[in-house]
Image (cartoon, helix red, strand yellow):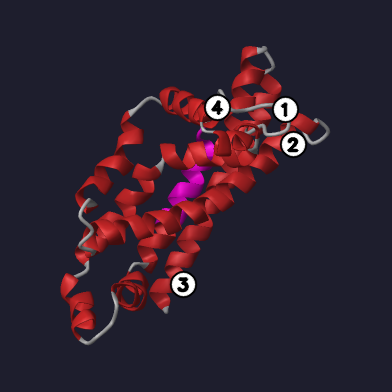
Amino acid sequence: MFTNDALLRSVTNSLLIGVVGSVLATSALTLAALVAHRSRFRLRSTLPAILFYPRALPGIVVGVGIFWTFVLVAPLEPLRTTVWGIMLAFIVRNTAVGYATIQASLLAISAELDAAARTSGATWFRACRGIVVPLLRPALAGCLVLMFVSILNDYDPAVFLVTTGNEVLGVTMLKQWAAGFAGPVAALGVIQIAITALAVLIGRLAWGAKLRA
């Protein structure tokens, strides 16, 4: 397992995509939830539908759409053969998972809190940053863990994006299985399960520390 460069790259690439992608996705989804439920932006009601829509589509369809976006939009074309392009595909595919976590907690926070801050002279950004986001920290931690696990275990949006050098766990396992090599598939599966369990454990420990504090 650790002497095969392609297999080892698939593990390191998946970890990189999972960590960076979950942080970026959580930040973007937090902003989207605040705009959708705590702002007067004219098109705010369309944001939840946009974020849930990719999950309603087959992952292969999402992957094909992102592939052709990279091909047809010149500034994005360099992303097509990089791990960052795959990361973007995984984030788009799993926005519903993270957004649902944040939305449920955000709706439980009274809008009167940030409205009181606005009445006292705070800007929308200041009210959200100083009042709403701190109350959302448990939900944001949950979103971070869920997005990491979802991105780590996803594969179908990346089928058309993976090339030599940007392999990820799911696609590598699929290719190895199609070629008849069950051993590497089993090894990668064990590693995938171990990383997922570790991420969930860290999330639970962080949640327990938060409750004790």
Please say if 87 is above or below 38. above
Image quadrant containing the C terminus: bottom left
Residue at mark 2: 8
Predominant secondary structure, magenta span = helix
Q: Position of residue 175 (x, y in %)?
A: 63, 19
Q: Position of residue 163 (x, y in %)?
A: 67, 26
Q: Position of residue 47 (x, y in %)?
A: 27, 48
Instruction: Assess disc 2: are there few (<14), some (14-19) or many (≥20) residues with their C-alpha within 10 Å of its C-alpha.
Output: some
Residue at mark 3: 209
Q: Quadrant of residue 128?
A: bottom left
Name the element at disc 1.
loop
Q: Earlier in the sequence, mark 1 or mark 2?
A: 2
Residue at mark 1: 164
For the magenta stretch, what is the residue range?
Answer: 143-154
- Going by the numbered disc 2, the residue's amino acid type is Leu
Left or right of 126 in this view: 49:
left
Alpha-carbon span between mark 1 and mark 4: 18 Å
Q: Nearer the viewer, mark 3 or mark 1?
A: 1
